[in-house]
Image (cartoon, rainbow, N blue to C red):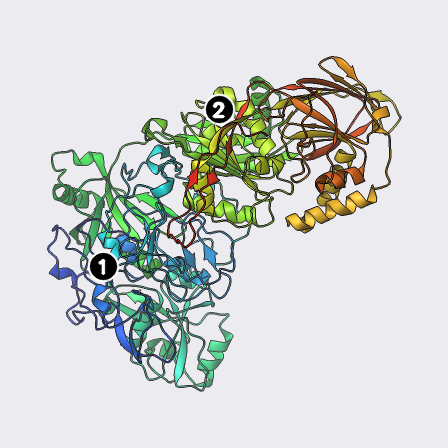
Amino acid sequence: MAAAAEPGAHPWLGGGAPRPSSPACSPVLGGGSRSRPGPGLEPVGARSPGPAAAPGHSFRKVTLTKPTFCHLCSDFIWGLAGFLCDVCNFMSHEKCLKHVKTPCTSVAPSLVRVPVAHCFGPRGLYKRKFCAICRKGLEAPALRCEVCELYLHPDCVPFACSDCRQCHQDGHQDHDTYHHHWREGNLPSGARCEVCRKTCGSSDVLAGVRCEWCGVQAHSVCSTALAPDCTFGRLRSLVLPPACVRLLSRNFSKMHCFRIAETVALEPGEGDDSVDGGAATGPGRETLAPAESSKQTLKIFDGDDSVRRNQFRVITVPRQARSEEVLEAALRAYYIPEDPGNLELHALPLQAGDAWARAKAGSAGISEEEEGSRGPGSCEASPEAWVIRALPRAQEVLKIYPGWLKVGVAYVSVHVTPQSTARTVVLQVLPLLGRQAESPESFQLVEVLMGSRQVQRTVLADEELLLNRLWDIRQTSLRQVSQTRFYVAESRAAAPRVSLFIGGLPPGLSPQEYSNLLHEALATKGAVVLGITCFAEAERLYMLVRDTAVQGQLLTALVLPDVLHWNLPPDSCPLLVFVNPKSGGLKGRDLLCSFRKLLNPHQVFELTNGGPLPGFHLFSQVPCFRVLVCGGDGTVGWVLAALEETRHRLACPEPSVAILPLGTGNDLGRVLRWGAGYSGEDPFSVLVSVDEADAVLMDRWTILLDAHEAASAENGVADAEPPKIVQMSNYCGIGIDAELSLDFHQAREEEPGKFTSRFHNKGVYVRVGLQKISHSRGLHREIRLQVEQQEVQLPSIEGLIFINIPSWGSGADLWGSDSDSRFEKPRMDDGLLEVVGVTGVVHMGQVQGGLRSGIRIAQGSYFRVTLLKATPVQVDGEPWVQAPGNMIISAAGPKVHMLRKAKQKPRKAGTSRDTRLEATPAPEGDPK
């Protein structure tokens, strides 16, 4: 578990003053490994002592019947005996017990420094991964946090504490320095400890820890020897620091804040922090016991809420077990660290739907009243369902946490009596926290529910009786008590501001037209702008926009944070990442998740959810940043066009752009050395390569399409088409080249599910090409070409191609390498385009096979192509049929800055290094 305690914090979780008959050591938490002090042993208001070894575990010696590994050192446990925690299944050597620092699941919520909820994506199969709650392997579909490396069984989700990464400031506890955010287990099997350099990863058990910001890995024992402050590691110049991001998201979930699409409906029990009914077992994940065995299976509820939802945990106990043993088993199933002496089990009254239980009780001649009076240890027709109830308490010891930083203590403890209100507790706590000189009226008591999916804050009224409040929480859910904290915080009124991005509107309108359009579509007073100063209004608009269509297209609503650019370190150049999840089969979706975890998720954008404009808006005030585009050549062109559109609004008007090729051809990626296509490289290595890449210039070209006329399909009347402009980076094809691209595009539109691999896509291209092998239309008779306002006579060709880079059709050199005194040596930044012709499909195949090159026709910076009839055209792989008219190709203003992957140093023979390969800059002046 990624839990970090403030200096002075300890995992004591008292359930109130001890009852006279209760033992001094809880069987659930003591378990032969340590004693848990009762509440009366801690001086009220004193600073809490440091954590003891094995915090919260209940270890007992067990006999091993199969190969078992230690969860601390990950070594094999030789012999027949090991030590197992009855609550969280932590297994250890006897010699390792005194070194265990990993907290038990039952006390992990008390060690969280700043509660941050998780973002769980859809269920998936994760091989050789382990659940962070019960520590068992994930053999069935499980859940994974999209922001951190937390893996869970679906029925373990309610017991996960809110210990995700803090990726932005939210106005509650805003840190300017960050400590390591440790996450236990699920490391690569070859991971090495940063301290002792020995292997700390394991594919057999949940062992070792990893910082989810800087990536440093270590044994849990060795991690204490590392400096607590995190510097964000090798990627620190690319990471958008959390202290530089502000997002006040009171009414929005973490999924909304990180723009994570909610594509899969939640199953019962997943929408909140509740337990799935019927499917959940205890920590050991037991199976149901046969009726004739010596054990019995019981349903356990932890309060009114689980009874109402019919969501329970299943435990298996001996039929002759005492009530105390059953209660302890029930507490272990819910990971409840309370003293069993303060609790008891009540038989759940039979419901109308419990026909089986009613028939069972009736056959034994037992009434509901008699049944409710029996203890769960009775073997005579005991009821199948029980609910854990808290006993009334005359007073409790309550932990109060400071809602500000740099206090020196994690919390203070105060007595709560039936007369204690929120206001009296604030008055009692302020002197203990050193704020006695300030007015108590400027502070308030805040209740924080630290759920795994959402952190809920409630400001308590001054007259709220705290003992009654705690009683109500325990009646609702005993598990909820350990996930609830009370903070004393300054009652300052935060100025709400929510940036709401609305996309999907028609382009080219004036600001007043956009205002009128939004006013009509959303039925609000005035225009909707990005900055909204009311939380309730922002939430209302967000939900309204998502259900609104303008001109038949659904609008897009995104919650965007604010980047505090003045807080960025001087050497910071954060990376803005765009990922097209539809590219590269399933690789795009996996990369999206990986980059969210390696960087700040606020700097990673999914292009199918709003396009590139939200990302450029977020980074508009960042003085220096770079861009990584994950997708095909069409995706790169999309992002470059958006960059050109927003360039005048950016504080960094010329960011450098890197490419992770996920498409079919990936010609631009080949030229810039990023490869023919992504094949599963380590995403960390990709980011390191981006950081070490060299900046180069590349021409961009504007194509003006001015159709003279377009024949109407209904009556043959000619209608004028409005001119349109497209941007080009790689090449523009007219004729047979564009026709093949158009056929491929139409085949993909008809069956998009089949086009998930680069190999299949190229196979479709081959099939389409074979169908056109005998095609002949005489393109040279259907078009006219002018270069620099000079008419150029065309040879007999079927395709005309304008190329800006030395790669076409998946890496072919269409221009050729032969020297020619008529033309200059091509470069991607020379301000010139090369014009090449092909005679047909066979010629194109020969070019792609390296047997021939194209027919060199011209070289220039200004072109006019006259289409005498409708002709297929493609620009950077995006095809369409262009109506007769003119095409004017000219330079598109300033050149764009691209990132070319640096050449790697050759590794010396016979050497092996644990570090990743370094890179050296490439020589300047490489030809395109």
Q: Residue at x 38, y 63 (%)?
A: 202
> Which residue position is annotated with label 1?
13
Query: Would residue 264 be visible to someone looking at this image?
Result: yes
Q: Residue at x 42, y 31 (%)?
A: 498
The amino acid sitting under disc 1 is Leu
Report the Cα–Cα distance between label 1 and label 2. 55 Å
Amino acid at the residue labelled 2: Glu
* Residue corresponding to mark 2: 654
Up-down relation of residue 706 to residue 257 (above or below): above
The earlier-in-sequence mark between 1 and 2 is 1
Q: Secondary structure at mark 2?
A: loop
Residue extending furthest toward the top: 789
Q: Nearer the viewer, residue 412 or 128?
A: 128
Query: Residue, x 29% and y 43% (percent of image)?
Result: 230
Mark 2 crowdedness (10 Å alpha carbons): few <14, some 14-19, many ≥20: some
Q: Residue most toward the right? A: 715
> Residue 756, can we see it?
no
Compared with 297, 157 (above or below) is above
